[in-house]
Amino acid sequence: MTIYKTLLGSDFYKLHPNLQSRYALPVGESFYGKGTMLRIKNGGSWLKPFLTLAARWKFLFPEAGENVPFTIKNTCRQLPDGRDEVYWERTFYFENKTRHFNAFMTIDSKRNIVRDYLGEPSFFYSDLKFQVTSEGRLQIRSGAQRFVIGSFEIPIPQFLEGVVAVEEGYDDTREVFTISVDIRNRIAGRLMAYEGEFKAHTV
């Protein structure tokens, strides 16, 4: 059973059928999508050094634009300890630069949340809470975040956290998945935001 089915329980079947298909990802299989980011925004110019540094770890990046081609690939695999993990690969093709935004998700069944390990290598993770809207869309909200140093975890103060809001849906009229992401900091404001659409493709 996929980590998302485990997390959502019976609510998983309230998702739009195409979202159910997308997130019901067996171990050893991948979902691949291709589409366009209609808008990508970042924060103020003073954040550019931080965003440029983050790009080295396939996390955030400083570029912005409209109608940016992108691909998304989700792969479910089993870790050596027997847990299932979903590897997220998001690639954005700007005119003069290709950027990545990658993550590794596992489930914390005791707390009923997903741990979202961001970047490669992952120096921290964020708790994620999933819920299904009455229209069958998937909403994701961030919670507490922690630095990871070897086997040690250090809580990140709230004023340093990224506050994440994600909504994914499916447009039956145009037969596309829709996605919107907003990442902010309580002090710095917007770090990154994007919205776009994509279709499932075979690699």
Image (spheres, helix red, strand yellow):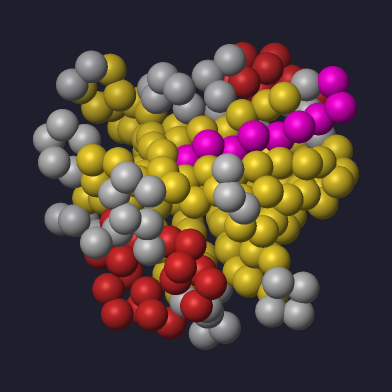
Magenta: predominant secondary structure element?
strand
Q: From where the camera sits, is residue 191 visible?
A: no
Magenta stretch encompasses residue 139: no
Residue in the picture at 58% in, 15% down: 56
Where on the picture, by quarter, is residue 59?
top right
On whether residue 95 falls in the magenta region, the answer is: yes
Q: Residue at x 29, y 49 (%)?
A: 27
Q: Is residue 35 left or right of residue 142?
A: right
Residue sticking out furthest to the left: 81
Question: Who is closer to the viewer here, 109 or 1?
Answer: 1
Q: Is residue 20 visible?
A: yes
Question: Relative to 128, is 57 above or below?
Answer: above
Q: Residue at coordinates 77% horizontally, 49% vertically from top-left?
A: 36
x, y percent for residue 167: 58, 62
Q: Residue at x 58, y 20 (%)?
A: 54
Q: Residue 58 or 185: which is nearer the viewer?
A: 58
* Residue 149 in which image quadrant: top left
In the rendered image, the vertical position of residue 40 relative to residue 95, given as above or below: below
Q: Over which residues does the magenta segment extend? A: 88-96
Q: In the picture, which quadrant includes the N terminus?
A: bottom left
The picture places residue 106, in percent across and down from the top left corner, at 29, 45
Q: Give residue 200's position: percent from left, percent from top.
A: 61, 57
Residue 170 percent coordinates (x, y): 63, 71
Query: Which part of the image, by quadrant, shows the C terminus?
Result: top right
Total numbered badges shown on the rendered structure:
0
